[in-house]
Structure formats: C-alpha cells, structure tokens
Image (cartoon, helix red, strand yellow):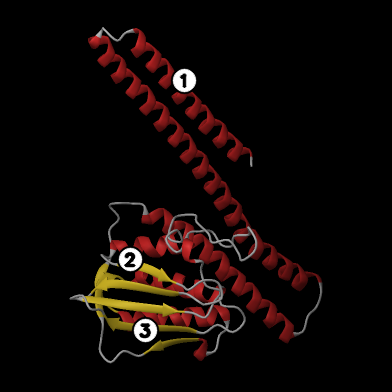
Amino acid sequence: MRRRKTAIFFLVLGISLSALALALNVGWIILSLREAALLVLGIVFFALIITGLILNTIFLVREIRRSEQHDAFLNSVTHELKTPIASIRLYLETLKSRPVSDEKRNEFYDIMLADSDRLLNTVEQVLHAGRSREPRRQFNVTECDLAELLGSAIALVRSRYHLADEAVRLSEPAEKFMVLGDAEDLKTAFGNLLDNAIKYSGDEPKVTVRIKRTGMKNRIAIVIRDNGIGIPPEELKRIFKRFYRVPAEGTNERKGTGLGLFIVRSIIEKHGGKIFAESKGIGHGTKFVIHLPAA
C-alpha cells in the first residue's frame, strides 16, 4: 500500500511538472514570437524536459513494481522453506521425545522425506532461475528421446504425490521423437509443468501428456492437459513472467514462488522452442503446448 501511494505521488508529480512546463513554454512562445532562433531552441529544450520527466516517472513506477515483486518473492520463498523445515522438526522432536510404533515411525519417515523433497524442489527452482539468466551458460547437448524424458518426469511426480498410474498418463507415441538438448534441463521443464498440473488439480487429478508432430516442418509438440482449476484468459500472457503468480479464485492469495513457469519458458526458448498456455477460464482446466525443433 505504501509503495502504491509513492507510485501515485510520482505519477501526479510528473503530470503536474509536464503541465507546468507546457504552460511556461506556451507563454514564452507568445512573448517571444519574433525571435525564431530562440523559439526553436526553446522547443528543443521543452521536448527534452518533457521526455526526461516521462522517463523518470516510468522508471520510478517500474522500480516500485519490481521492488514489490521481489518482496512478494522473498515472502513466498520464506514460506516455502519454513513450512517443510517446521514439519520435519516437529516429527523429529516427536521421535526423540516419545516411543512410537514401527508403523508410525515409517509413516513419519515418509512424511519427512516428502517435506525434504519439497524443500529441495524450492531450492532447485531458485538455482535454476538464477542460471537461466546467464547468457553464456553452456548446455550439455545430447540427442534426447522425448518419451523417455517425459516418462521419467511423470514417474517422479507420481512418486512425489503418491499417485496412481492413471492420474498422470503418457500416450505412447507411434514413433520415436528425438530432440537435441540438455536432458536434465528438459526434464526440469517437464517436471515443473507436471508439478503445477497436480498442485492445481484438486483431490482427483487427471493429467494427460501427448507427443505429436506439428504442421510446421521439423517441429514436435508436447501437449500437457489437466483437469485443474484453470487460468483466467487475461492472465495467460503473464503467467510466464518471473515472480508472477495467478491469484486464487475470489481472493488475493497467491501460491508458489512465481518461478516455475518462468524457468520452463527460459529452458524451452534456449532450446529453440516455444511454449504457450490455453484455458477456457476458472474450472475448465489448462493445456500447455511446447514446440521443440526435431533432432
């Protein structure tokens, strides 16, 4: 709220200064109509002043918005790190302070391992986001089988969320689809998309994954469709921005770190591909389509 008031203040200040400069310039022109050289010089200086004011205002507004995004990111990352750490600590204290049955102990171990995976996933996302901004980062390029990469990502997501096989299904392609790229990075991109599909699909997720050829020459499409909460149409172009998170339906609450889809887009674009999302709105699920060049 405080930063919004600051942004409004600088906007009003910029507009007021622009209006004042315009009034002074018009008055000066009227008084100095015969002096053409000064008139031209005055117009040039006036244009420079107005341009400077506008650029200054735009810069201030962008910096305030960026600062707000960074604050929101830090808060969300803190929450994502603190929650599993607190959970692990609680179960460890329970195991230390009182005797528990073997069955209960194994249950505690499973929960702690799941929390550790969540913690590791958050740390990896932050690290990937940092690496994705390195323009000269080298890829470990190999020829990758998309069906194998997707199958591995699906198995990891099923294990993480304890899902049945039918919850996430890969339609086996009739042919091999090969791409040139970094296998680990591509697996990270697919894993982030599948992870989002599960997290936003309620208690009974149904996610389908399909690989097919596109109408364009030497292009392969990967289609990931879920039955989740969907995305409002006006948000579809913004969901791939860094730190951007779609607010929950009917509230201002935003989940996650805002890095998952940003990382996905960065990886896909560095592999010469494109990604876009489709959704008919809240309650209608989401479809992500990735286009990659064939090997």
Of the pair 195 and 90, the residue shown nearer to us = 195
**Picture coordinates of residue 129 (x, y %)?**
43, 56
Q: CA distance from mark 1 to mark 2?
A: 49 Å
Q: Earlier in the sequence, mark 2 or mark 3?
A: 3
Relative horizontal placement of residue 75, taking residue 24 as reference (left or right): right
The residue at which mark 2 appears reads as 268
Q: Residue furthest left?
A: 217
With respect to residue 40, does 112 lie above or below? below
Q: Earlier in the sequence, mark 1 or mark 2?
A: 1
Kind of residue at disc 2: Ile
Of the pair 41 and 216, the residue shown nearer to us = 41
The residue at which mark 3 appears reads as 210
Q: Residue at x 81, y 74 (%)?
A: 98
Residue 20 badge: 1
Q: Residue at x 31, y 62 (%)?
A: 269
Q: Earlier in the sequence, mark 1 or mark 3?
A: 1
Relative horizontal placement of residue 150, taking residue 280 as reference (left or right): left
The local secondary structure at tag 1 comes to helix
**Picture coordinates of residue 146 (x, y %)?**
31, 80
Q: CA distance from mark 1 to mark 3?
A: 61 Å
* Camera-nearest label, 1 or 3: 1
Kind of residue at disc 3: Arg
* Camera-nearest label, 1 or 2: 1
Of the pair 288 and 74, the residue shown nearer to us = 288
